[in-house]
Amino acid sequence: MGQGGGYGYPQPGATQAPPGPGPDYQQQRQPLSWSATIGPDREYFMAMMQRSGPEAAGLNLPAYSPEQQRPLTGNQMTIGRRRHSTGDTPDIDLSVPPEDPGVSHQHAVLVQQPDGSWAVVDQNSTNGTTVNGGEEPIQPFVPVPLQDGDRVHVGAWTTITIRRG
């Protein structure tokens, strides 16, 4: 045999660098990026119409409304409609055309969790907030943890899909 080395062994006197940090280390160091896709949802609208009283009779799903994309930033993102009297505008403003009349001015808040994920908190809105097509609104002021792909339903037709990455 020749002198040391070869076959994956280090040369005599050579040192090897310690292995780099594993994937868990990378995930801890880099904050997770989350986003929200906001738009009208026909299936949700039809379910709401079946559950609603006569006051909903005049509502129509918008013929066309492009989806909005919003990055989730900061510790919280407010959801609602702009209050014209004060100019207060939520982070996710659903007063832009086509305005969803079932959304309260201060409808809900997306709150970042310690692990970087998000939760939704209904702000005691008039029409409630549901998650993933649930029939019962979530309890006001109680955070509901969200997973990648979860759908938050507010108002008469608006669905906010939460995505990680």
Image (tube, rainbow, N blue to C red):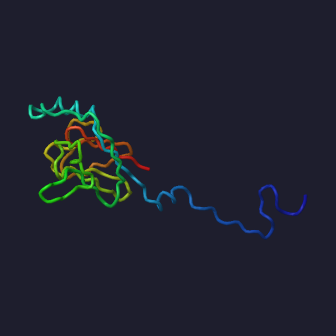
Say left or right for 107 vs 133.
left
Closer-to-camera residue (161/7): 161
Q: Residue at x 90, y 60 (%)?
A: 2
Is 161 located above or below residue 46 in the figure? below
Closer-to-camera residue (134/13): 134
Q: Residue at x 14, y 60 (%)?
A: 86
Is 65 located above or below residue 106 in the figure? above
Percent position (x, y) of residue 163? Answer: 39, 47
Q: Residue at x 22, y 34 (%)?
A: 61
User: Outermost residue toward the right?
Assistant: 1
Percent position (x, y) of residue 136? Answer: 20, 38
Is 146 located above or below residue 63 in the figure? below
Q: Quadrant of residue 156?
A: top left
Q: Quadrant for the N terminus, please.
A: bottom right
Percent position (x, y) of residue 63? Answer: 26, 33
Closer-to-camera residue (120/24): 120
Q: Quadrant of residue 98?
A: top left
Say left or right for 89 vs 149.
left
Q: How many marks?
A: 0
User: Outermost residue toward the bottom?
Assistant: 13
Percent position (x, y) of residue 12? Answer: 81, 67
